[in-house]
Amino acid sequence: MVFTASFMIAGGIQIIVSRNVDSRATYVVGVSLLLGLSREIFPAYFKQAAPLLHLFTDSMMSIGVLSAFLLNLIFRIGAMRSATFEFEDADTSAADIERLFRARGRAWSVSADTIDRAVGTTEQVWQHLVDAELMAGSPSVTMTYNDFDLTISVNYRGALLSLPNVGVRKRFFLEEESFSYGLADFLTGVYPDRMETRAAGENAQIRLIFSG
């Protein structure tokens, strides 16, 4: 029993910390554990509850699970965070995009791996749009995070990014250069968990979705 319980406890801790533990998660885990333990510390208090409530307060497990479920629902309110970065033209450097993404990622407690993927993929997409001269006007990037998915939306005026358009104005002098550029095009499509494009008149949007 001790052997099995040890692995169950270790597995439960791994599940709890598998995502970034922010203030919301801290309250959910901490309050749920305290309420569950209180069932054994103050058994007389719970016995005085109405008979209907005994269905939910009969054990530490039921109290802890129910408390975690309800608190998680409450703390999901307002969990969606969003920020929009507007640029004067398409000549924005990759360093500026990376700096904005990483600063916002730290503020939102986004995992470093997810931010690295978002930065690399967004820079590729942005460079493809610039090289193919598909982007005009003042583009903007919207960054949205809901504790599960990080969504990067590139909004601009111009044509949608597609493989036939990528690099159409770029001349290759070496076969290796052409292969490298084509490989970068391929990676752009598979590196995000999902990639969506949409257009409405002259306005185009590319959405890159990364599951954290």
Image (cartoon, helix red, strand yellow):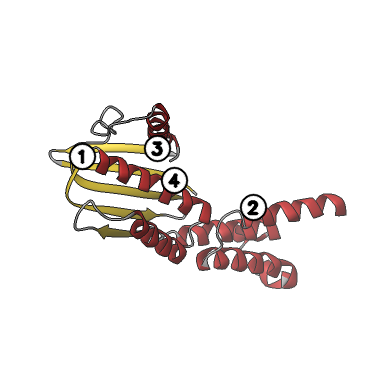
> In the image as oriented, which residue stretches furthest toward the front?
173
Q: Which residue is mark 4?
A: 210
Q: Please state which of residues 99 and 44 is positioned toward the viewer in this rendering.
A: 99
Q: Which mark is residue 188?
A: 3
Q: Which mark is residue 134?
A: 1
Labels 3, 2: front one? 3
| Residue 49, placed above or below residue 176 | below
User: Is disc 4 surrounded by few (<14), some (14 to 19) or many (20+) residues within 10 Å?
Assistant: many
Residue 211: x %, y % from top left: 47, 46
Q: Earlier in the sequence, mark 3 or mark 4?
A: 3
Name the kind of residue labelled 1 in the image: Leu
Label 2, secondary structure: give it.
helix
Q: Which residue is mark 2?
A: 15
Name the kind of residue labelled 3 in the image: Thr
| Residue 186, placed above or below residue 6 | above
Please give left or right for residue 51 compared with residue 151 in the image: right
Q: Earlier in the sequence, mark 3 or mark 1?
A: 1
Please give left or right for residue 154 compared with residue 101 in the image: left
Disc 3 and disc 4 in contact, CB within 8 angstroms: no
Label 1, secondary structure: give it.
loop
Residue 60: x %, y % from top left: 70, 60
Q: Earlier in the sequence, mark 2 or mark 4?
A: 2
Q: Earlier in the sequence, mark 2 or mark 1?
A: 2
> Rounded to the nearest whole Å, what is the CA distance between mark 3 and mark 1?
16 Å
Labels 2, 4: front one? 4
